[in-house]
Image: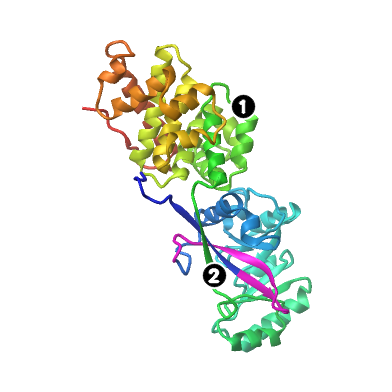
């Protein structure tokens, strides 16, 4: 959990320019990076792809990263065959199929469907072989020229030009001026490599407008009457959240004859209440680099606020929101009052977060004091024994939500009851 003086966690995206024969930047490739000083990707996976997607399309904003130019993003098999959705429109995106993808009928059908949706396809690190089946679908073909045999590269260029004249060729991994000049002579259309510019890592703090939007979604999820269509629309517009929800849902549904491929299908199959619980946990996890114990503390606080509020005839939904958002503020190292000022909250929740005023503010303060080992705080509000019962019920609920949202594996309780 951030301490006073700590900087907010940062996210990082590598960006490398692609040039045309005139020397103008025509596109950028966006690359996974896990640190500001990273010079290469530590992994190429569906998770890495989704993190690049969420950073590009929600955290930074595509305009900030690439302006109006094309945006190349590596995609893995899961995104091509529909196991995971490509959760953005085709406006500027070029889906770059990495060389490790095994091309079969499912991949060809998936790529065809993406093209029908308007996406542009690039083949990364192309060599003659299995990926030939995708040449007629590709707009760009990238050829790695580093340490390559010049005669072999020339033969590949001639063959692609002859059989697929629509394809535009990109020479990648150009390290020296000699590499660049050879690529020019071989007739490549576009050029990418360290001789022209190394990937530049861009970083931004986690509480961007997109993360503020996630906090707003948390608020929407915690109200008594959740708008099904609104929640589905919000989740579907968040690439990383969609990826994680579908991953968890498909794991839970693995024993069924159907696997879901959209947020709406997940909500219908599992029920909105279950999806709401999972997404709330995932949002918390994404909002800050928090441990299971820290996430459990926030979830337990929110649930305990709700339970206690209902016993004293206050709004359980408002209390859940107040407890949840106070915990989010703790995770992000921000003042609850500051966070409340940025959200469309009801007056009682705003007052509770801003200065602990009102009945709801008093209840939130009592729950927080209970967390700190002062049981007398809640004893003034609840009947004897009800505080312990509310806490244990909140722990049980939290454990159930967290275990359900994890990938399959040995269940464990993230929170242990007080001794």
Q: Which residues are magenta?
A: 17-37
Observer-nearest of 111 and 379: 379
- Membership of 156 in magenta stretch: no
- Quadrant of the image containing the C terminus: top left
Q: Which residue is mark 1?
A: 227
Structural distance between the alpha carbons of marks 1 and 2: 43 Å
Q: Residues within 10 Å of mark 2 (few under 14, many from 20)?
A: many
Observer-nearest of 280 and 97: 280
Q: Are marks 1 and 2 in contact (CB under 8 Å)?
A: no
Residue 120 appears in which quarter of the rendering?
A: bottom right
Drawn side of residue 390 relative to residue 155, left or right? left
Q: Earlier in the sequence, mark 1 or mark 2?
A: 2
Rendering coords of residue 362 (x, y %): 38, 20
- Membership of 20 in magenta stretch: yes
Q: Residues within 10 Å of mark 1 (few under 14, many from 20)?
A: few
Q: Which residue is mark 2?
A: 199
């Amino acid at each position: 959990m951030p301490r006073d003086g700590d900087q907010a966690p940062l996210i990082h995206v590598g960006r490398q320019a692609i040039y045309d024969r005139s020397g103008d930047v025509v596109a950028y490739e966006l690359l996974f990076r896990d640190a500001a000083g990273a010079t290469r990707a530590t992994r190429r996976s569906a998770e890495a792809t989704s993190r690049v997607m969420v950073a590009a399309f929600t955290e930074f904003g595509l305009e900030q990263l690439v302006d109006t130019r094309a945006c190349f993003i590596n995609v893995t098999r899961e995104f091509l065959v529909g196991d995971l959705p490509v959760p953005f429109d085709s406006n500027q995106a070029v889906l770059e199929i990495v060389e490790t993808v095994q091309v079969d009928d499912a991949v060809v059908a998936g790529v065809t469907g993406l093209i029908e949706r308007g996406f542009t396809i690039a083949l990364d690190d192309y060599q003659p072989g299995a990926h030939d089946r995708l040449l007629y679908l590709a707009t760009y073909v990238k050829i790695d020229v580093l340490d390559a045999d010049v005669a072999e590269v020339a033969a590949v260029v001639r063959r692609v030009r002859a059989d697929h004249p629509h394809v535009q060729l990109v020479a990648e991994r150009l390290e020296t001026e000699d590499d660049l000049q050879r690529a020019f002579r071989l007739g490549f259309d576009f050029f990418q490599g360290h001789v022209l510019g190394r990937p530049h890592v861009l970083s931004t703090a986690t509480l961007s407008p997109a993360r503020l939007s996630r906090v707003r979604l948390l608020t929407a999820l915690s109200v008594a009457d959740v708008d099904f269509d609104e929640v589905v629309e919000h989740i579907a517009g968040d690439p990383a959240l969609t990826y994680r929800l579908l991953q968890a849902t498909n794991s839970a549904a693995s024993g069924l004859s159907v696997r879901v491929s959209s947020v709406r299908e997940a909500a219908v199959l599992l029920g909105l209440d279950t999806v709401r619980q999972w997404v709330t946990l995932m949002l918390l996890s994404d909002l800050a680099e928090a441990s299971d114990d820290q996430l459990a503390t926030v979830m337990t606080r929110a649930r305990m606020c709700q339970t206690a509020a209902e016993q004293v005839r206050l709004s359980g939904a408002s209390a859940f929101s107040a407890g949840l958002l106070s915990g989010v503020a703790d995770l992000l190292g921000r003042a609850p009052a500051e966070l409340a000022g940025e959200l469309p909250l009801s007056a009682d929740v705003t007052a509770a977060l801003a200065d602990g005023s009102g009945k709801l503010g008093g209840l939130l303060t009592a729950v927080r004091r209970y967390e700190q080992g002062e049981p007398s705080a809640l004893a003034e509000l609840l009947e004897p024994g009800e505080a312990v019962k509310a806490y244990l019920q909140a722990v049980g609920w939290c454990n159930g939500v967290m275990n359900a949202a994890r990938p399959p594996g040995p269940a464990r309780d993230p929170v242990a009851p007080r001794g």
